[in-house]
């Protein structure tokens, strides 16, 4: 299990916070030098989300979304604000959230809240969100904290709301990255943690057209 890789929880979180403090508040910074894949990523996410905006048993509302690990608001600006009336953003790096106000421009007025917090310490407002979007950030949570966070997200959903995780997955097993202090898990481990949070997977999709040298990226919708 991946939590066994984290010998010192405090150091694990401190090191990640320190890493992100030194990253430039740009799209390229948010994507670890892969800024050029942003449009491909966003079009894949839009396609994935469309199935939950059409009429049917899984249709969600479009009032409130939460962007977890939001950075400067790349996803908020180009994926969430075009669909949802208001978006809340949460990120551990206060500088990113400050820069987000300029990056979002006039659209910043539709941000309900800017929360500066690590997800291990963050509790979404009860029954608020139609969508909670969690992208490229679950690796910064231990297994136990990921399960606990997903449970808190579940309580933060509207009755028909959904949670989406979009993240890197290893082919098999778990890999620790000491540079940014993160864990990359395989799909079996991620789905096991989702089950532990008493959530059911509604859809799963691999992101297409990403560079071959990076991990496979999957979107998983659950409720």
Image: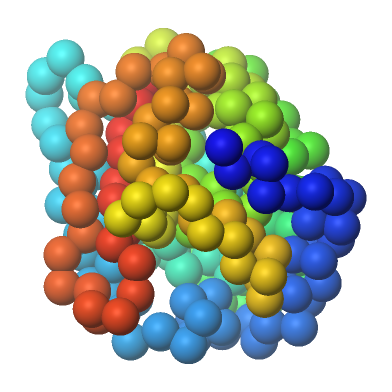
| Residue at the (33%, 87%) spot, across then down | 36
Camera sees residue 163: yes
Q: Give left or right: position of 46 versus 214.
A: left
Of residues 12 and 104, the one nearer the viewer is 12
Of residues 182 and 95, the one nearer the viewer is 182
User: As displayed, is residue 101 above or below residue 59?
Assistant: below
State which quarter of the image contains the N terminus: top right
Q: Give left or right: position of 178 versus 73.
A: right
Of residues 129 and 42, the one nearer the viewer is 42
Of residues 86 and 161, the one nearer the viewer is 161
x, y percentage for residue 107? 50, 63
Q: Give left or right: position of 44 versus 154.
A: left
Q: How many badges with numbers are in the image?
A: 0
Camera sees residue 67: no
x, y percentage for residue 101? 64, 70
State which quarter of the image contains the C terminus: top left
In the orientation shown, which residue stands out farthest toward the left? 55
């Amino acid at each position: 299990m991946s939590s066994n890789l984290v010998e010192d929880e405090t150091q694990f979180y401190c090191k990640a916070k320190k890493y992100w403090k030194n990253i430039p508040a740009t799209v390229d910074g948010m994507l670890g030098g892969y800024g050029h894949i942003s449009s491909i990523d966003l079009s894949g996410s839009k396609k994935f989300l469309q199935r939950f905006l059409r009429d049917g048993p899984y249709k969600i509302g479009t009032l409130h979304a939460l962007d977890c690990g939001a950075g400067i608001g790349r996803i908020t600006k180009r994926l969430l604000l075009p669909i949802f009336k208001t978006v809340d953003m949460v990120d551990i790096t206060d500088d990113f959230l400050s820069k987000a106000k300029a990056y979002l421009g006039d659209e910043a007025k539709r941000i309900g809240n800017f929360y500066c917090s690590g997800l291990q310490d963050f509790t979404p407002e009860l029954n608020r969100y139609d969508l909670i979007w969690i992208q490229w950030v679950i690796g910064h949570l231990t297994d136990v904290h990921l399960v606990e966070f997903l449970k808190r997200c579940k309580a933060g959903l509207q009755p028909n709301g959904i949670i989406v995780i979009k993240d890197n997955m290893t082919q098999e097993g778990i890999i620790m990255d000491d540079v940014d202090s993160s864990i990359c898990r395989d799909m079996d481990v991620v789905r096991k943690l989702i089950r532990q949070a008493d959530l059911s997977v509604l859809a799963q999709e691999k992101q297409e057209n990403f560079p071959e040298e990076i991990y496979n990226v999957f979107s998983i919708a659950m409720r």
